[in-house]
Image (cartoon, grey):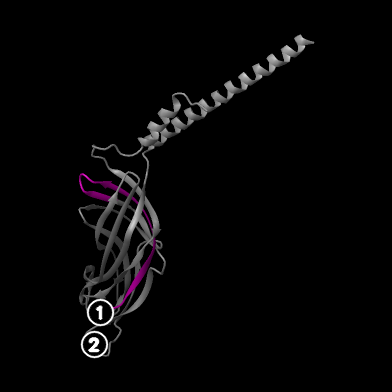
Amino acid sequence: MKFGGSLPILAALIFGLGPKTGHAQTQEYYYSGPISGFISAGLTPSGLGQGGIAAAFGTITETLFYNPTANTLQEEGSVTFNSRSEGSFFISPQIDFPPEDVGLATVTVGNNGGFQFDTTFRGASGEILVPVSGSGIYQGQEFSASWDLDFPMTIHILAATSASLTFSQNEQDFLEPGSPVVDGLATGNDDGTFGEQWIQSSVVATAVPEPGSLALLGLGLSALAFSSWQTKRRLFLASRSRALAVVEQIFRAN
């Protein structure tokens, strides 16, 4: 079956979908899958206590924009938790023995069972901010606040092609120093301590074709289908002409 000039055009469109070599261009990739790790958040008066909540990661869905010339990688996406992300606990000063509960706190990590992020890595370093909110009572005094946990991150690009991006993204620190998050407590500011672990090893994200490329591909496929229809129609008309000629010869012979 012959496709005339449509096949070369279609081939050019298909092989021209990726970024053009020799041009500085940001390539878009997509990944969705499981992720290992957790993030924990505490809420204690002036860092002199213990107690908190840890939420384990479940899945991650993200879009990545990689620019090898600028050596930047932008990540936009969301992470879900596969464990509870809200909990209540007693505040117990570490300096007392035996410990005595002096307050009660409730902490929520993320929003509605997960969190969203939008960050840009320059080189191998970046950070993700995780929203946290907490409230409670300390020595009869109510308190509440919302803040972000600064989640430092290291990323390594292992391979990048027009079809896929392979990378590893890891970080772990089981005790980060807290920062003041609630003002006005009897003992000073409330302190949000936390720990985290993020593990993505040799993850493969697939390339996302540009909208213009998809439109061109659709146009090429339409042209190919039309060319195929024309060919079939010509074959049908030629077969019908031959059949009519045979019938005419039979009538003339009779």
Question: Which residue sits furthest front?
Answer: 253
Residue 55 in magenta? yes
Circles 2 and 1, Cβ within 8 Å, touching? The answer is no
Report if residue 59 lies within the magenta region. Answer: yes
Residue 236, x across and y down, in percent? 62, 22
At 27% from the left edge and 90% from the top edge, which residue is drawn? 98
Q: Which mark is residue 236?
A: none
Residue at point 33% right, 68% down? Answer: 38
Q: Identity of the amino acid at label 1?
A: Gly
Is residue 214 toward the left or the right of residue 47 in the image? right
**Displayed quadrant of residue 208:** top left
Q: Residues within 10 Å of mark 2 (few under 14, many from 20)?
A: few
- In the image, which residues are magenta? 50-74
Residue under label 2: 96
Residue 164 percent across, percent down from the top left: 34, 48
Of the pair 181 and 210, the residue shown nearer to us: 210
Q: Is residue 29 above or below residue 116?
A: above
Locate residue 242 relative to residue 212 in the image: left or right: right
| Vertical relation: 113 (above or below) 240 | below
Q: Position of residue 97 (x, y in %)?
A: 25, 90
Observer-nearest residue: 83 or 170?
A: 170
- Res. 49 mark: 1
Three-letter code for the amino acid on which mark 2 is drawn: Asp
Asked whether the viewer can see residue 249, the reply is yes
The quadrant of the image that shows the C terminus is: top right
Q: Is residue 253 left or right of residue 214?
A: right
Task: Describe the element under mark 1 as helix, strand or loop.
Answer: strand
Mark nearer the N terminus (2 vs 1): 1
Residue at x 27%, y 59% (from the top left corner)? 128
Does residue 148 appear in the picture of this structure? no
Q: Residue 113 in the image: x percent, y percent? A: 40, 63
